[in-house]
Image: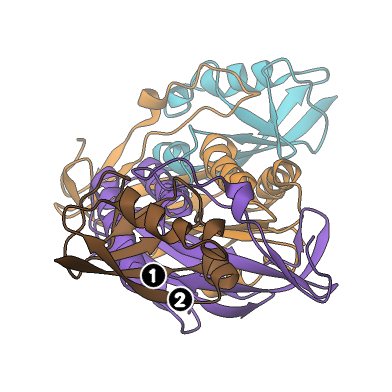
Chain colours: A orange, B purple, C cyan, D brown
Amino acid sequence: MIFARVASEVIDPAEVLARVGSDRDGATLLFLGVVRDHADDRPVSGMRYDAYEEMAGEVLSKIAAEAAERLGTDRVAVVHRFGELAIGEVSVAIAVSSPHREEAYEASRYVIEQLKERLPVWKKEHYVDGVSEWVEGNVPPGTASGAEPVAVGVAVGTGGDA
Amino acid sequence: MIFARVASEVIDPAEVLARVGSDRDGATLLFLGVVRDHADDRPVSGMRYDAYEEMAGEVLSKIAAEAAERLGTDRVAVVHRFGELAIGEVSVAIAVSSPHREEAYEASRYVIEQLKERLPVWKKEHYVDGVSEWVEGNVPPGTASGAEPVAVGVAVGTGGDA
Amino acid sequence: MSVPVHTLFFAAYRDRLGLSELTVELAQGATVADLVAELRGRGSPFDILPEQPAVAVNRTYAMLDEPLGAGDEVAFIPPVAGG
Amino acid sequence: MSVPVHTLFFAAYRDRLGLSELTVELAQGATVADLVAELRGRGSPFDILPEQPAVAVNRTYAMLDEPLGAGDEVAFIPPVAGG
């Protein structure tokens, strides 16, 4: 059964993994996006994810359904978190399973690439030096292209604009 | 730390997953190969994996090291099981993690493709109709090419040659 | 007769405007472009909004010529960065 | 003086030969090809081995011209099917 959720609770990878897999499946793939301690070469202390929660849930469901079509099965589960996350915490978990591995890799990749393209979620990196900055993002397809990523960059915190 | 193992014990995906991931990593990928209930359209009741155990451990370590080079990190863990497996049991688990997802997908795929090509492991499918058959395989690179996959196909069990 | 539209601001827009939502009265037949012009016309801080922003109308991405009706929810969507 | 070589048979080969290992005495300077010829020369059931089998010598894949020495481990490798 296709499962898609945008929520503020801690993501349990085992729980997401347990939502996929059936006797018909020979391949299961779990992708975890994790908050890492650096961005390019800049030390990061944590990350805040904001979400347009209601819409993000709908978009994520659509992406999961599209992935299921590519996968050829309904075994797709994806959970995206929002709120304040520490280094090492899971921001997104994507589990898929299918009879053959080829489709599993493709569908998993499809979900992560599409959600980066379309999911109304934003992340602000907190740097070790005290500055926080919204991460440059993507203009979603089907919208005006005048929202230049660079135009919305903004820095707050002790370091001021960076 | 790179981890590679060929063993007869049940594979615990969470344990394999826990071997990878570090504060530097933004992406973790877990692949599970699972015994499925059919091969093409033929119902399967289980699978037996045989291994040239000592050599398989060495080959798997080599594959993991090659994947780590592609990955750019040493966070690679792979476990392949042998013995009698029931439907739904995990035959192979591959976990990798890296700062960026691109390399994680590539390295994960590299491990599964290479082990199918080179790992001295064989599987015999047990069909629901009582017949068992060695699954057609690949002639490993660096060996004589005269060992035609079809020449070693053999069926045993109540159904006789199939 | 004016048409009330519910606007939402997220992430960098929210930070820079200092507000997360606003109800705007538009003329009948107004489009997203008219809403943008109305807001940007208020000057600072609304002039930080792009002339051609990405928006979602009632939770679906939309272009600037999308017509708006009473009670529509229009979200201003900075470039997205999930994952 | 003859050279003892330890041979291993796996999977389909093991099933069809009905044995998993065998020590074979070869002439000095023998190669994998000579070992194959010696075994196939025994007739049934050894003639089920391919004329050009995949082998591993001391746990490394090898070609037919690989020279063999006393105590070498030669495994006959049916097409592999892990995963």
Quarter where residue C18 is shown: top left
Label 1 SS:
strand
- Residue at 67% x, 62% y is B154
Asked if the residues shown at circle 1 and circle 2 are in contact, with their CB atoms under 8 angstroms apart, the answer is yes
Quarter where residue B119 is shown: bottom left
The furthest residue to the bottom = B9
Q: Which residue is mark 2?
A: D20
Please say whether residue B147 is visible from this viewpoint.
yes
In the rendering, at what x and y percent does residue B81 appear?
48, 74
Q: Is A52 situated left or right of D77 in this image?
A: right
Q: Which residue is mark 1?
A: D8
Question: How many labels, in total?
Answer: 2
A36 and D60: which one is in front? D60
In the rendering, at what x and y percent does residue B73 appear?
23, 53
- The amino acid sitting under disc 2 is Ser
State whether discs 1 and 2 lie on one chain.
Answer: yes
- Marked residue chain, label 1: D
A115 and B127: which one is in front? B127
In the rendering, at what x and y percent does residue A23 appear?
74, 69
